[in-house]
Image: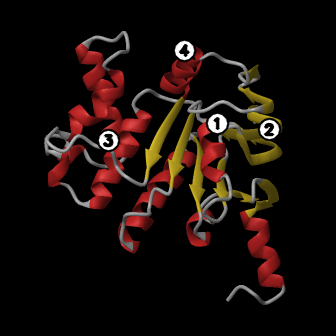
Amino acid sequence: MPELIKTVDLKKDYINDGVVTSVLHGLSFVIKAGEFVSIMGPSGSGKSTLMHILGFLDHLTDGAYFFNGQDVSGLSETELANMRSTKVGFVFQQFNLLPKTTVLDNVKLPLLYVDLTEDERQARARQAIAAVGLEHRSGFLSNQLSGGEKQRVAIARALVNQPSLLFADEPTGNLDSKSGEQIMNILDGLNKQGHTIILVTHETATAEHARRILRIKDGLLTGDENVAEARRQKALTGELK
């Protein structure tokens, strides 16, 4: 698989009233197209900051970031916004849906400024809604849905621009265990269809739905493990029941 993401000694500092706070301390890794990767770490570890940089929501301070072979480290705000709207989709813990708007219209929102006809927007939105199994809810208002259904709408909205990469930031955080499992199964299914997914979480059980886990602590990359191999090793040592 070709490289989709490559970081080289990536660093991020924040400056407030002349005080420099270093958050990321030189991260280097590669994520290939089609992978399902979890970025895992405790609160304050830097995982959300890393996601914001990888998702073109923020600038790195030093180092390099290559996306699909292009060095995007020094892009302008306009260029970042273009990459953000065309290359990546986001699913957050808070669903961020318009409450008195239908499922179909919520999913169509990212297409408002895309050069498509209304029929093309409708078709894309319906395709994305079908991908998360909510065709029967397309005419419902989002405030008529359960939490799990709302998150499925958020996933459909993230897919509608046909991005190269889907970010899921604590996507099960506001859900009960059954709904959370359904959401993770949807993400797993999307990955099997070829979508590249980066999952950001602090929960081990959620992270292990991915194929690979990047572990971050105090702004440092402390682990890069293959989930299946880690399970095999635990089984051999009797740790996995």
Which residue is disc 1 drawn over? 53
Which residue is disc 3 drawn over? 130
Q: CA distance from mark 1 to mark 2?
A: 10 Å
89 left or right of 114 in image = right
Q: Earlier in the sequence, mark 1 or mark 4?
A: 1
Q: Which mark is residue 78?
A: 4
Quadrant of the frame with the C terminus: bottom right
Do residues under tags 1 and 4 come within 8 Å of each other at their CB atoms? no
Residue kind at label 2, given as amino acid type:
Leu
Q: Earlier in the sequence, mark 3 or mark 4?
A: 4
Do residues under tags 1 and 2 come within 8 Å of each other at their CB atoms? yes
In the picture, residue 178 is in which quadrant? bottom left
Mark 4, other Cα within 10 Å: few <14 / some 14–19 / many ≥20: few
Q: Position of residue 108 (x, y in %)?
A: 29, 28
Residue found 73% across the figure and 58% down from its top: 216
Which residue is disc 2 drawn over? 10
Q: Position of residue 142 (x, y in %)?
A: 20, 47
Q: Earlier in the sequence, mark 1 or mark 2?
A: 2
Mark 2, other Cα within 10 Å: few <14 / some 14–19 / many ≥20: many
Q: CA distance from mark 2 to mark 4?
A: 22 Å
Mark 3 or mark 1, which is nearer to you? 1
Residue kind at label 1, given as amino acid type:
Ile
Q: Position of residue 176 (x, y in %)?
A: 36, 71
115 left or right of 103 in image = right
The secondary element bearing badge 3 is classed as helix
222 left or right of 138 in image = right
